[in-house]
Image (cartoon, grey):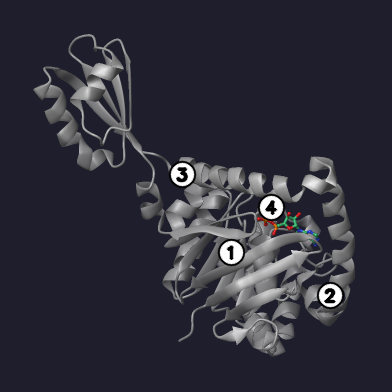
Amino acid sequence: MPPAIETVDLVKDYGELRALNELSLTVEEGEFFGLLGPNGAGKTTFINTLVGLVRKSGGKAQVFGYDVEADYQQARNAIGLAPQEFNVDRFFPIREVLMHKAGYHGIPEDEAGERADEVLKRVGIYDKRNERFDWLSGGMKRRLLLARALVTDPDLLILDEPTAGVDVQLRHDLWDLVTELNEEGTTILLTTHYIEEAERLCDRVAIMNEGHKVTVATPDDLKRRGTDTIEIRLESTSPAATTIESALGEYAHEVSTSGDQLEIRVDDGGSTVPQVLHDLEAAGHEIADLEISRTSLEEIFVDLTRQEDRSVTRSSASSASGSGGPDGDDVASEAAHGQTQEQEREHEHEHEQEREQEGVA
Ligand SMILES: Nc1ncnc2c1ncn2[C@@H]1O[C@H](COP(=O)(O)OP(=O)(O)OP(=O)(O)O)[C@@H](O)[C@H]1O
């Protein structure tokens, strides 16, 4: 079986703005895969390329072995998309909206009705089936987007920030539901700004920044990349940090002291503690209390994307040197938007019917 998603050197240019920069990613069938990145990293562009709403500028993109452009219909039929924006037809009862969507993907009317009922029950808004989208609460609208993504019984479910702005209860309901779907075999691609969400749900995450891949790892592996802090209280006032440093080995990256408190930064707190205790005691320091605080995934994420930003800023600063600095960049980006609309027009026409179903303006 080919991977659920495979992109190789995927590029998307909006005029002069490179939104996807030689992005190579593989998501295996059955995985729960997270896509993380700061605003503007290219997550939605990546998704829109997979579902045919954006035409790639270069590279390869396949869904279950189908090329997203050459085999558009096969690739698209395998995907259920719950987009970030509420893009639903507002004039029909929501059950009909779901039936239209199923019909567009070739599902006969009887079956479409059954599927619509089934997914409305599954997301918990069956009693609202005859109401229009505008009459639903914000949380119900999110549930409907998920129902619409599920009505075609997709092998790949793409969730673009599904829990943005929803209350805690609904967030937990959605987490349970997507976990269940994944356990039943659906591959899931999730973008989110909630690091806790990625940590809780995802087998692996890719961190993106400025259109390219920074890293791909399991949440646990990522956390291991951060440094931990061992916080120690001594029985007596601590000597200067330099004295403590000389009692410890190279494993201690940073030592700070205050009164009887010590803070020691190490790579892996759990396995370094015995050595720290041994070295401190050998140097005559008695330990009253000890605690390890682990780096959160959020801190590692911020760190990874901040390091990236620094290097990106440097390279864009040198390439923009003839355009008058930041103001020049703004002008270039506006021009890029103008050019983009031209380039996308032909493609938009091609998928007009699809976009009507999705309700994209
Ligand atoms: N249609 C478009 N025309 C021109 N530029 C665009 C277009 N769509 C996106 N961009 C630009 O491409 C870059 C990536 O945007 P994208 O929406 O994919 O990021 P994102 O990671 O999904 O961000 P967010 O987390 O804010 O949703 C941004 O610089 C954005 O301004």
**Residue 42 lies in quadrant:** bottom right
Would the CB of label 3 be found within 8 Å of ligand 1? no
Q: Is residue 140 visible?
A: yes
Measured in 3D between alpha carbons, the distance from the residue under mark 2 to the one under mark 1, in whole angstroms, is 31 Å
Task: Name the residue rendered at 25%, 24% in the picture.
Answer: 245
Mark 4 lies on residue: 40
In the image, which is nearer the foreground, mark 2 or mark 4?
4
Instruction: Say which element carries label 2.
Output: helix
Task: Name the residue rendered at 49%, 64% in the picture.
Answer: 33
For the residues bearing labels 2 and 1, Cβ distance under 8 angstroms: no
**Would residue 94 be found to the left or right of residue 209 on screen?**
right
What's under tag 3, amino acid-wise? Ile
Where is 8 relative to 321, above or below? Answer: below
Instruction: Say which element carries label 3.
Output: helix
Where is 120 relative to 191, above or below? Answer: below
Measured in 3D between alpha carbons, the distance from the residue under mark 1 to the one under mark 4, in whole angstroms, is 30 Å
2 or 4: tag closer to the N-terminus = 4
**Tag 1: Cα neighbours inside 10 Å, few (<14), some, or many (≥20)?**
some
Mark 2 lies on residue: 348
What's under tag 1, amino acid-wise? Val
Measured in 3D between alpha carbons, the distance from the residue under mark 3 to the one under mark 2, in whole angstroms, is 38 Å
Measured in 3D between alpha carbons, the distance from the residue under mark 3 to the one under mark 4, in whole angstroms, is 19 Å
Measured in 3D between alpha carbons, the distance from the residue under mark 2 to the one under mark 4, in whole angstroms, is 22 Å
Ligand 1 is located in which of the four quadrants? bottom right
Instruction: Say which element carries label 4.
Output: loop
Pick whichever, 73 or 71, lies toward us. Answer: 71
Would the CB of label 4 be found within 8 Å of ligand 1? yes
For the residues bearing labels 3 and 1, Cβ distance under 8 angstroms: no
Q: Position of residue 255 (x, y in %)?
A: 32, 24
Task: Name the residue rendered at 63%, 80% in the picture.
Answer: 152
Q: Position of residue 282 (x, y in %)?
A: 9, 24
